[in-house]
Amino acid sequence: MNFLQTALAFIVCLGSLIVFHELGHYLVARWCGVKVLRFSVGMGKVVWSRRFGPDQTEWAISALPLGGYVKMLDAREGELAGLPEADLKREFTRQNVWKRIAIVAAGPAANFLIAIVLFAGLFMHGIEEPSSKVSVHAGDNAAAQAGLRSGDVITAVNEQPVQVWSDLRWQFIQSAIDKHELRLAVERAGQGRVSVTVPASALAALDLEGDVPGQLGVGVSRPAPVVQQVMPGSPAERAGLREGDLLTAVDGVAVADGIAFIDIIRASAGKTVQVALLRGGQPLILDVAPQAEQAKTGKGTVTVGKIGAYVALLPDMINVPSSPIAAVGKAVAKVWETCTMTLKMIGKMITGEASLKNVTGPITIADYAGQTARMGAASYLSFIAFISISLGVMNLLPIPVLDGGHLLYYSLEVLTGRSVPERVGEIAQRLGMGLLLTLMLLAVFNDVARLL
């Protein structure tokens, strides 16, 4: 079932974005008076097609689902002898350079527009997610050294306001990419507003593929580990645990929240541990023997301990809806920030400052599509918006065969007054295709490596 859901989520995500991208090219081409011969979803051999409209444009589905194209009347792709003059005037290369730029740029622009619409809708609806209240991991870490404490509510990062965990995480990632210090505005119980600074040196060596806040020692603040339910006949019931018990320590190790308690219990299969708790304000210690069970993880099947008790885990959740005007403004800013961060990341991979492992392909996209679809509509739509931005940015890279390569040619034509020589264009196309195939192979290799 998960496989089918993942496959469907991937097809809907990528398929819809390809259609919108190509519709951008198609609509602007028609607006500029260029004759469109075919609109294809997919590449390669056409498996289904129908003709519609005054130009009898062929609307097609092709065999390879990764991609699509709009085929226009173009002298570079066939002889035009015998065509009526009215059609010759609508040939692509006979249009002025600004029309050609508009047609090529319309595809990526459509991707950015869809992302803005999706984000604006999400911002207007409001997304329930964890607040910016944090917990600081025990031990020697950058957050603790800087003076951040569990229970602090971060209200701004580098002067950028944050209310929810996703905004906080986003600002942390941007600072890690730029290797800038983190200047945190914090609301602290009993002290009011305080400032905390995490130095740039603490961010310089972070793994950008991993949990950036977690590597600094920061996590989502979760409630105290209070027992919410005890299963009949479970090890927890036999040991005497009750609903409402506040768990404070296991074998002398303090537990700050339910996650910490669960981690210790999972690692104690087949052992007897002493659980310290408060019941009605009175301290109590119980001997609990976690039952060994088999559990599947990303690394295979492992033995874990379970006691049959549920503890409070859900962090403080907030929903912050925006007015339509504010939502559109936030959506535009979100798309812009994502574009700039993506370009910075690409630049760092080119210079060797970031690992090429960050290049991902269809397998990883499909995996994340399935995961976000199972999390709910808001998460899935947000994922589609991010993928749409990535497609827009990727297509604007100045690589021949991509939209950005064609825009580079036309920009040179604007500057020099002459089109790029046909022979130069052919060589550039071959080089661009080779580079694109190399990137695709790298992406697939990284995808398979992640699975293994």
Image: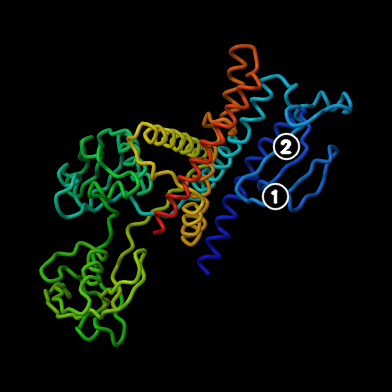
Q: In which image quadrant can residue 234 be found?
A: bottom left
- Of 75 and 262, nearer the camera is 75
Q: In this view, does 146 lie to the left or right of 398?
A: left
Q: Are there few (<14), some (14-19), or many (20+) residues within 10 Å of tag 1?
A: some
Q: Do the residues labelled 2 and 1 touch (CB within 8 Å)?
A: no
Please state the horizontal and vertical placement of residue 267, each as a whole percent of the image.
Answer: 22, 70
Q: Mark 1 points at which residue?
A: 62
Please state the horizontal and vertical placement of residue 323, each as a whole percent of the image.
Answer: 51, 42
Say what amino acid the circle numbered 1 marks. Answer: Ser
Mark 2 or mark 1, earlier in chain: 1
Q: How far apart are marks 2 and 1 (CA)?
A: 13 Å
Please state the horizontal and vertical placement of residue 33, each as a whole percent of the image.
Answer: 77, 28
Q: Name the residue under label 2.
A: 71
Q: Is residue 229 left or right of residue 14?
A: left
Please state the horizontal and vertical placement of residue 442, each as a whole percent of the image.
Answer: 45, 45
Q: Quadrant of the C terminus?
A: bottom left
Q: In which image quadrant can residue 76 be found?
A: top right
Element marked by disc 2: strand
Q: In this view, does 92 lie to the left or right of 425?
A: right
